[in-house]
């Protein structure tokens, strides 16, 4: 397999479309105003305590609301709410009250004022514990102070039940996908044992 | 839809299995030693300059190597390399030379010493520009100094071609999935226009 090597200085393609990521909607609230923004740049960063990070440009209205309130909610959306993800991605909360314009069903969080979206599969209510400007975005680190989730969407050990729900994934540009329903189990210990025996690629 | 609200203090399920994330292999190198580690906690954080963040426990050998070298590579793997992802997740580089034990095909990066995996769909070569301890992990922020990728895996504007390749997604525990081949396009401007006309849910 011959790889193409490119330094970023001459890379004309967006570097961040190389892998699908969950297309979340981040909600924020301050001074009586709510906003909702599509965010694909997010990740868990600590298990205990439970912390979550998002990356938001300081040009965004969401950035302004998070700075004022110290709170945000990460809403993990199903594929059937793709239209909403695309619509909140397509305009600014400075110009449009997205909750009204797109008839977004929500209620305030249990621990924060920012909105928990009714149609989210799960929502992490976060209080900001750190902000780090890097390049053209800021990393906001949030302590997850409460989790709301739709019980029917999750199975054993809190894993998303892909046979029942379709999480929306962002692929880049205005393109989306979802995860395949048939997830698979990989027995790490058995695979390592097999590799030790000199057969790293199992046949079955 | 009735949500279950749980504060994390009583949440027995892992909070971070609520959404699939790319199952990457992060490689590192220092003092003549290579390591490879499965990492699902990662995200882009800035476009220009191109920056990428990963979250790594300070108990990991990878953490030690990154601290020494100031470098890492994020390798985005295809589903067919799931066995390798599971195997590198199942043991520590302090005890096993994973590259030898699992016969990992790789070469040093073009800008860093850490390994670029031959079977990765894309690899981001990163130089550390910041580290932030949070909870039980550290955020490492890396400047992407070079990108290597398999050209046949990517199509228009550098988007992963899901009809040709299957990226591996981590679902939690030892469970994995991939993205569906049939990605879909959502025209944000047209959807917003339709919402303004009072029909937020398009029929077609």
Image (cartoon, coloured by chain):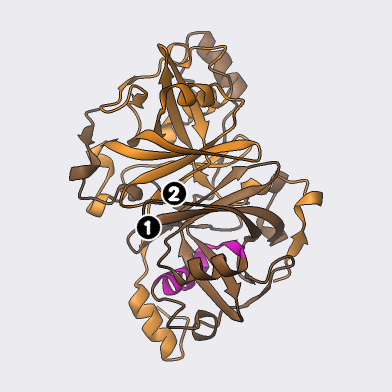
Chain colours: A brown, B orange
The x and y percentages for residue A200 are 47, 16
| Towards the viewer: A47 or A85 | A47
> What residue sits right under mark 1 in the picture?
B183
Q: Secondary structure at mark 2?
A: loop
User: Which residue sits at x=50%, y=69%?
Assistant: A64
Query: The residue marked by circle 2 belongs to what chain?
Result: B
The x and y percentages for residue B104 are 40, 19
Q: Quadrant of the C terminus of chain B?
A: bottom left
User: Which residue sits at x=23%, y=50%?
Assistant: A13
The number of numbered discs placed on residues in the rendered structure image is 2
Alpha-carbon span between mark 1 and mark 2: 9 Å
- Asked if disc 1 and disc 2 are in contact, CB closer than 8 Å, the reply is yes
**The residue positioned farthest toward the bottom in the image shown:** B197
User: Which residue sits at x=34%, y=72%?
Assistant: B187
- Residue range corresponding to the magenta coloring: A70-89
Q: Residue A44, can we see it?
A: yes
């Amino acid at each position: 397999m011959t790889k193409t090597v490119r330094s970023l200085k001459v890379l004309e393609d967006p570097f961040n479309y190389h892998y699908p990521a969950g297309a979340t909607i981040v909600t924020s609230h301050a001074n009586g105003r709510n906003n909702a923004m599509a965010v694909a740049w997010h990740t868990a960063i600590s298990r205990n305590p439970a912390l979550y990070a998002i990356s938001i440009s300081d040009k965004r209205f969401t950035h302004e609301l998070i700075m004022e309130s110290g709170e945000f909610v990460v809403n993990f959306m199903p594929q059937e709410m793709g239209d909403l993800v695309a619509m909140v991605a397509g305009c600014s909360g400075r110009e449009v009250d997205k909750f009204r314009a797109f008839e977004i069903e929500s209620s305030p969080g249990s621990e924060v004022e920012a909105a928990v979206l009714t149609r989210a599969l799960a929502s992490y209510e976060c209080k900001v514990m750190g902000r780090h400007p890097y390049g053209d975005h800021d990393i906001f680190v949030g302590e997850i102070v409460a989790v709301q989730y739709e019980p029917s969407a999750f199975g054993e050990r809190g894993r998303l039940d892909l046979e029942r729900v379709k999480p929306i994934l962002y692929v880049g540009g205005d393109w989306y996908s979802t995860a395949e329903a048939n997830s698979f189990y990989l027995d790490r210990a058995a695979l390592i044992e097999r590799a030790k025996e000199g057969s790293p690629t199992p046949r079955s």
